[in-house]
Image (cartoon, rainbow, N blue to C red):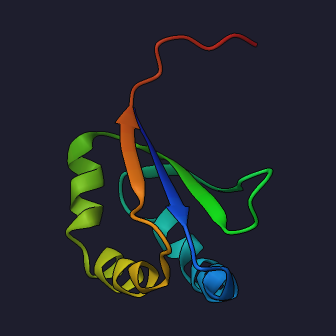
Amino acid sequence: MLIRIVRMTFREEAVEAFLENFEGNKEKIRNFSGCSHLELWKDENSKNIFMTFSHWESEEALNQYRDSELFKTVWSFTKTLFAEKPVAFSSKKIQELP
């Protein structure tokens, strides 16, 4: 399993547009082949910083999503709303303590 986190800083006036777009596409993203989990996080101290947290079967599954029309549509809209360049990284879980 691949864990993907994308940290996005939006222009303050663009936050509502981002949230509406996410709301309209979250089920499609979550149900995309290879995606088993999707969360949207908000920074505790900044009202315009959000993170997506997702689980993918593999890097290949993530890349299939990134090559899809769904991603191209969602991302082309989302990137127009940024105040800063997004930061994304992929990780694999090593340990989890209950």
Residue 48 percent across, percent down from the top left: 67, 69
Q: Is residue 83 above or below residue 35?
A: below
Q: Quadrant of the C terminus?
A: top right
Q: Nearer the viewer, residue 72 or 45?
A: 45
Q: Quadrant of the N terminus?
A: top left
Q: Is residue 27 above or below residue 46?
A: below
Which picture quadrant has residue 80? Answer: bottom left
Relative horizontal placement of residue 62, taking residue 36 as reference (left or right): left
Q: How many marks are shown on the rendered structure?
A: 0
Relative horizontal placement of residue 44, taking residue 7 as reference (left or right): right
Q: Nearer the viewer, residue 75 or 7?
A: 7
Residue 77 percent across, percent down from the top left: 42, 87
Residue 61 percent across, percent down from the top left: 27, 50
Residue 75 percent across, percent down from the top left: 37, 77
Relative horizontal placement of residue 78, taking residue 69 as reference (left or right): right
Q: Is residue 17 above or below residue 71?
A: below
Relative horizontal placement of residue 88, taking residue 25 as reference (left or right): left
Residue at left 26%, top 64%? 66
Residue at left 55%, top 56%? 52
Residue at left 52%, top 62%? 8
